[in-house]
Image (cartoon, rainbow, N blue to C red):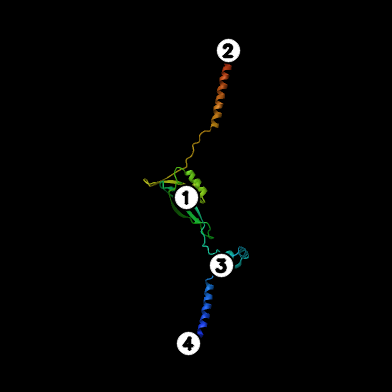
Amino acid sequence: MGNVIKSANTPMKTTYYFFALLISTSFFSQTKLIAFKSHSGNTDHFNSAVSENLFDANFSNLGIPPQSFVDVKLDSVIILNEEESVLVTRSSSKFLIDGNKREWDKNREVIHYPVLFSKKNIDSVKTILKRNYNFINDMDSVAVVKFDKENKTYKEIKSVQPKKDKEKSEKTPRGLLLGILMISGASGLYSWKRNKKNNEK
């Protein structure tokens, strides 16, 4: 009798197991949008799904983690020695929630073997910073300082300003004018003496 009841319950258990398995797989299944992208769905179908706003397609990021966008300002470059320099920066979130004030976090980044950051070529350093980096402030306002280990002090390194020599174009008119005045004065003096001699005769 016990064997008969046991065999009768077996199909029922199998049915329960089948339904339990079916329900559990639905819990772990992907959303339509993620499944669509995962299995290389047709682009035309995907475009129509997005344009018609099916299954909240426009609000989905397909599981990509939120990205952080920041603005970075370069305050100064500290040259420690020939092999190390420090970039002193401030960073803040690019997008702010309404009502929040912008807060700037101070950062320091050590750069090893910075051939670029040499006290001999400050102008070219600033030119490269403008061209290759995305700092939001003007690179001409960035202070470049050299750290003196012995005195524990910082000395600002300024750009070498070329000496303003007088151009040749400025010198030539002055010299030419002086020469004309001398020639005209000499010829006038000669004419005056000649006329004086003729009048005496």
Q: Position of residue 166 (x, y in %)?
A: 52, 33
Secondary structure category for the residue under label 2: helix
Label 2 packing within 10 angstroms: few (<14), some (14-19), many (20+): few
Specify which label sits upstream in the sequence, 3 or 2: 3
Label 3 packing within 10 angstroms: few (<14), some (14-19), many (20+): few
Residue drawn 61% across the image and 67% down it: 54
Q: Mark 1 points at which residue?
A: 75
Q: Mark 2 points at which residue?
A: 197
Residue drawn 56% across the image and 67% down it: 35
Q: What residue type is labelled 4?
A: Asn
Please state if 107 lies on the left or on the right of 57 as rendered: left
The residue closer to the viewer here, 71 or 124, is: 124
Q: What residue type is labelled 1?
A: Asp
The residue closer to the viewer here, 35 or 96, is: 35
Above or below, 3 against 135 in this view is below
Label 3 close to label 4 by CB (< 8 Å): no
Q: Distance between the residues labelled 2 and 1?
A: 82 Å
Q: How far apart are marks 4 and 2 (CA)?
A: 163 Å
Q: Which of marks 4 and 1 is in front?
A: 4
Residue drawn 58% across the image and 12% down it: 197
Q: Name the residue under label 3.
A: 35
Label 1 close to label 3 by CB (< 8 Å): no
Specify which label sits upstream in the sequence, 4 or 1: 4
Asked if residue 138 shows in the view, the reply is no
Secondary structure category for the residue under label 4: helix
Q: How far apart are marks 4 and 1 (CA)?
A: 86 Å
Q: Mark 4 points at which residue?
A: 3
Determine the residue located farthest toward the left in the rendered image.
150
Q: Distance between the residues labelled 3 and 2?
A: 119 Å
Q: Which amino acid does label 2 sit on?
A: Lys
Specify which label sits upstream in the sequence, 1 or 3: 3
